[in-house]
Amino acid sequence: MICLPEASEHRLRQLKAIASDVRLTVLEWLKDPRTNFPNQKTEDPAKIGVCVTLIAAKAEISQPTASRHLEILKNSDFVKIRKIHSWSFYSRNEDAIKEFSRWLSINV
Amino acid sequence: MICLPEASEHRLRQLKAIASDVRLTVLEWLKDPRTNFPNQKTEDPAKIGVCVTLIAAKAEISQPTASRHLEILKNSDFVKIRKIHSWSFYSRNEDAIKEFSRWLSINV
DNA sequence: TGGGGACATAGCAATATAGCGATAAACATA
DNA sequence: TATGTTTATCGCTATATTGCTATGTCCCCA
């Protein structure tokens, strides 16, 4: 059986995380939160992040499904969460994304 | 529903192709075919590629399963096939891999 | 012409993934 | 306290993926 090196387990998790049309698109949207989520009034989406409900609405999926996708993106380190009151504001983790991209360019 | 831009369909296919422990490992093995497949006598693995049977044996999966994985890697452009007689010799498509890596570093 | 090796395809079973509605938890406010 | 809002989790169904065996195809060689 295939035995992946310990260090690559995390990379495989990251690869699976972005190998999804929904998650790839959400990551893309989060590059420009002000343009893609202009209706968020509670917090500045570019500074704090975007809440789950607005992401679900734009992706036209249910809120639980969006929550699950965002959990997967979080487990792969591609996004960060900022929790304020009952909101969860999601934003890109540019450092982790860059590091992943660098790993891929070297190791794949 | 999510509607991925036309151009990204191919990228999503590529992401799904390497989001697999088996396929990621095979791609890794194909970086150094002489070391990883020293038993191939018919053709030089480093020049022509590696045949399906040896890949299946090293990965400890059945030949049809290996064939399927290699087909997925081929459809994503990550490998090339060289057919000689009844053999199919697989090798990395370094150009396509580099192009993919460049796309990812810019667009994800 | 027949046999054997190498590969791809078909068909099936098991597992993983993605979607939903219902519901619980946390919190602000009337 | 009661209500409404936001999010996460649970349970379920549908689909996709991965593995296998069986089989067909192609090609070389006896």
Image: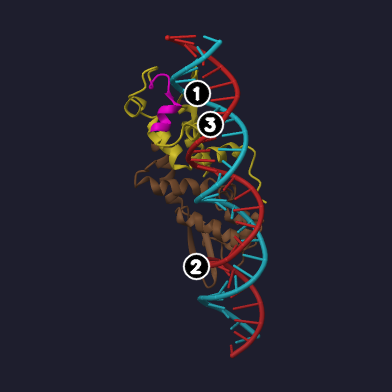
Chain colours: A yellow, B brown, C red, D cyan
Q: Which of B36/A68 is in front?
A: A68
Residue matched to label 1: A81
Q: Are dots 1 and 3 in contact, CB under 8 Å?
A: no
D30 displayed left or right of A12: right
Q: Is residue A5 above or below residue A97?
A: below
Q: Chain of mark 1?
A: A
Q: Which of B66/A102 is in front?
A: B66
Callout 1 amino acid: Ile
Q: Is residue A53 visible?
A: yes
Q: Residue A66: percent from the left, percent from the top?
A: 47, 33
The residues tagged by marks 1 and 3 sit, at their Cα atoms, a distance apart of 10 Å
Residue matched to label 2: B83
Callout 3 secondary element: helix
Magenta region: A45-57
Callout 1 secondary element: strand
Residue matched to label 3: A71
The image quadrant that residue A53 belongs to is top left
* Quarter containing the C terminus of chain B: top left
